Amino acid sequence: MDLKAYVRECALRAREAATRMAVLGPGTRERALLAMATAIGDCAGQIREANAKDVDAGRAAGLPTAMIDRLTLTNTRIKGMRRAVAEIAAQPDLVGEIEHLVRRPSGIEVGKMRVPIGVIGIIYEARPNVTADAAALCVKTGNACILRGGREAINSNVILARVLAEAATSAGLPGHAIQLIEVIDRETVIHLAQAEGLVDLIVARGGESLIRAVVEAARVPVMKHYKGVCHTYVDASADLAMAEAVCLNAKVQRPGVCNAMETLLVHRDVADQFLPPMFEKYRAAGVELRGCERVRAIDPTVKPATEDDWYAEYLDLILAVRIVDAIGEAIEHIRKYGSAHTDAIVTKDVTAARRFVREVDSSSVMVNASTRLSDGGEYGLGAEIGISTDKLHARGPVGAAELTTYKWVVYGEGTIRE
């Protein structure tokens, strides 16, 4: 197969669909989304059956437990996908909205109208729920999408994309508004990222090596979801019971996702009191601990942490732990080793909280809350297409608003420039 021609044909169909999507009314988009939500529920059995094939293949291939977890679609997760699509349908429609309309001295009225970006390519790995979230958000914002999931979830993605596309088309969307690249050869990723003039934006989420390959090859803009090296800093003034609950949740609630905590930083004044009971809870949950020498002085059974551990995104039940002398040292550690994803402080000191929020330059900064709450659904976006660690044009969880751009709209009455 000529993979470049295959991807180009997908992009040409998407470009045509995007032109038609841009002029659809909000009622048509809402009907399509509700039909998509219903279809997920109606086809849950088919989805589970396809997903079981992926999970069995993943286990046979020796995929890590955390990746198997990301790959698996339980009944609860399928219901969650359906609910997310329905929530997106219920959100206010942004397309066509004119913001900040003002009258200028010349007599013209000037404003910004929200419009679709056009054709969006989404490149992702082992989480099939991304297929539903991405398709729904693109429909909501009048974009055509080309989905390219990972080989680990190919059976799940194929059935999901077909179910969603058929439901959307039956409700009035143009054909090919939702497409999946069903060829899992890595070459298709490169061709999609190089479809200049046909694809307007690539959203890349997955392993760091995949994203770097996309960025290096791309000829169209890329919104990157780099790795999530998330930190929690337990301050000297922290409520230690609160800190224990937050830190346990941040690591073990779902360790294989990007907003799970990977490094725990603890102020020296509370380390002796906080760490031993915290370590007991971590070990009971199956967490492997790696620490600095000061941590190992408190608990010699903790494995020594290497320099690489501070940079690591484990996506597993492994945690790096470091004792720091002050909040400034914690902030410097995050600046050096973090990935600008999500970082948290647990403290009762308002001044410390304000300093942490001001000086930690991450896409989400949490105060007395688990990093696991860094999520589009938790933020009220309904769902997300990824968490951008870029600063332009979107940052943090990427919802519907971030999948639109704008054009200037000017109203006059025969107005001319003097």
Image (spheres, rainbow, N blue to C red):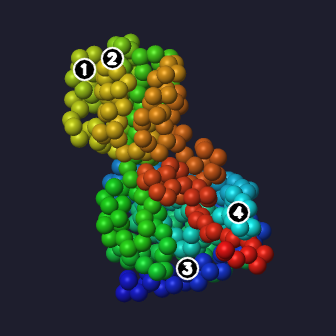
Expressed as whole percent of the image width and height from the top left, the position of residue 369 reads: 53, 31
Q: Quadrant of residue 410?
A: bottom right
Q: Residue 181: x, y in percent?
A: 47, 75
Amino acid identity at mark 3: Ala
- Marked residue nearer the N-terminal end (3 or 2): 3
Tell me which residue sits at (51%, 64%) in the image: 156
In this view, the mark in front (1 or 2): 2
Residue plotted at (31% across, 20% down): 325
Mark 2: amino acid: Arg
Quadrant of res 33: bottom right
Q: How many other residues sit within 10 Å of disc 1, few (<14), some (14-19) or many (≥20)?
A: some
Q: Is residue 315 visible?
A: no
What's the mark number on residue 104? 4
Distance from the alpha carbon under mark 1 to that under mark 4: 64 Å
Q: Which mark is residue 14?
A: 3
Labelled pair 1, 2 in contact (Cβ < 8 Å): yes
What residue is at 51 percent from the left and 84 percent from the top? 12
- For disc 1, the marked residue is 294
* Secondary element type, mark 1: helix
How many marks do you count on the picture? Answer: 4
Task: State the quadrant of the N terminus.
Answer: bottom left
Q: Quadrant of the C terminus?
A: bottom right
Q: Which mark is residue 268?
A: 2
Tell me if 154 is positioned left or right of 85 in this view.
Answer: left
Q: Judging from the image, what secondary structure is the residue with disc 2 in?
A: helix
